[in-house]
Image (spheres, helix red, strand yellow):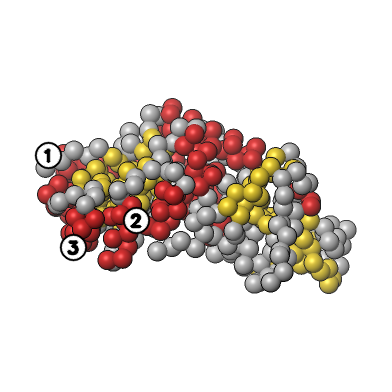
Amino acid sequence: MSAIPPAARPGMALAEIDTPSLILDLSAFEDNLRAMQALAERHDVALRPHAKAHRCPEISQRQIALGAQGICCQKVTEAAVFIDAGITDIHISNEIVGTAKLDLLARLAGQASLTVCVDNLSALQDLSDALVRQETTLGVVVEIDLGQKRCGVQKPAEAVALAQAAEAAPNVTFRGIQAYHGGIQHKRSLEQRRQSCEAAARRVGRFMAALDKAGLTCEVVTGGGTGTAAFDAASGVYTEIQPGSYAFMDGDYGSLEWGESLVLRHSLFVQGTVMSTPTPNRAVVDIGLKSTTAESGLPRPIDLPDVRSVALHDEHLMLEAQTSQHRPALGSVLRVVPGHCDPTFNLHDELVTVRQGKVEALWPIRARGYSR
């Protein structure tokens, strides 16, 4: 196959980047990193950003350089990529089941400081067995269900039983609990999120009281996310928070109501080229479902207030202008805010970072596709 030229090179103007490309505005990105780090430090909680949001070690390295405790990963192979990049404080914020995954996790535990979630006694035993086989150790946190109805134990007594089993299991150390409710991250009003966070904190408190009564030390209470970070950090319950999307602010998070305690900006965009103008009001862009996703809403054009997205197909984004004068011209380059940053990152091999309209660097999305 003939060599394919890169989509971008350092020093290129923004408009020269081949499309579709994933673009990171470094000025907005760095402002977002500083804002979340300052929030965590103001409330004396650790910041453990979620790497599943981007799968790019260069991003995590910059978060850690600003003071982040470490990172979260969601999958074992994802964690392996970040360990290879030199990041060695990782919480796998998910349950891991299956011999192959557990053996890999146990091997990685010899290379990094790892914790992982558990919510089942049998799975805990399998984890312990894998660690014994590999002669390594790691910490476990008991995941509790705050109402999302996903993973997690349902009752304080179940958390106590799991924690006690972890204390007794070979090569495992009980570290604390994970209390994460993804659903409340996306409640539109600030007051709705505040009330939901207060209810979640009360539920966490009941689990912590049960663990304390049983004589179990809950060193870590981890959870929270971008939408609730301001409330979680101030709750007095969490010892660390796990936001991920805050660095990028996708379309879904951008549509929420935000207060003054945390100000974040859009930094992530997909850049495309108008490839067809078949009607006076329609423009078709070379961005499709292979470049971004639509489960959290259509990508939104920026700097085009009179143009809206109306459909997203495999290779085409359809835009509709209010009038023919507002329609983007054939060949023009534009940027859209993706509705959901996590799966959008996973569709790209690299991130084109820009500052003041010029390409600064290309960052590989090294953990793209590592979902085992």
Which numbered tag is attached to residue 122? 3
Q: Choose the circle earlier in sequence order: 1 or 3.
A: 3
From mark 1 to mark 3, how far is it between C-alphas? 23 Å
**Residue 80 sits in which quadrant?**
bottom left
| Label 2 neighbour load within 10 Å: few <14, some 14-19, many 20+ | many
Residue that appears at 82% across and 58% down: 332
Residue 362 image point, x, y percent: 64, 49
The mark lying in front, picked from 2 and 1, is 2
Q: Give the percent coordinates (x, y) of residue 86.
A: 44, 43
Q: Say which element carries label 3.
A: helix
Residue on which the image places disc 1: 215
Q: The disc labelled 3 sits on which kind of residue?
A: Ser
Q: Would you place residue 52 above or below residue 11 in this image?
A: below
Whether residue 30 is visible to the viewer of this picture, yes or no, is yes
Say which of 157 and 9 sits in front: 9
At x 69% / y 72%, what residue is drawn?
1
Q: Position of residue 338 (x, y in %)?
A: 62, 56
Badge number at residue 94: 2
| Mark 3 crowdedness (10 Å alpha carbons): few <14, some 14-19, many ≥20 | few
Amino acid marked by disc 1: Gly
Residue 37 seen by the camera: no
**In the rendering, which numbered label is found on residue 32?**
none
Q: Please, what is the three-letter code of the amino acid marked with disc 2? A: Asn
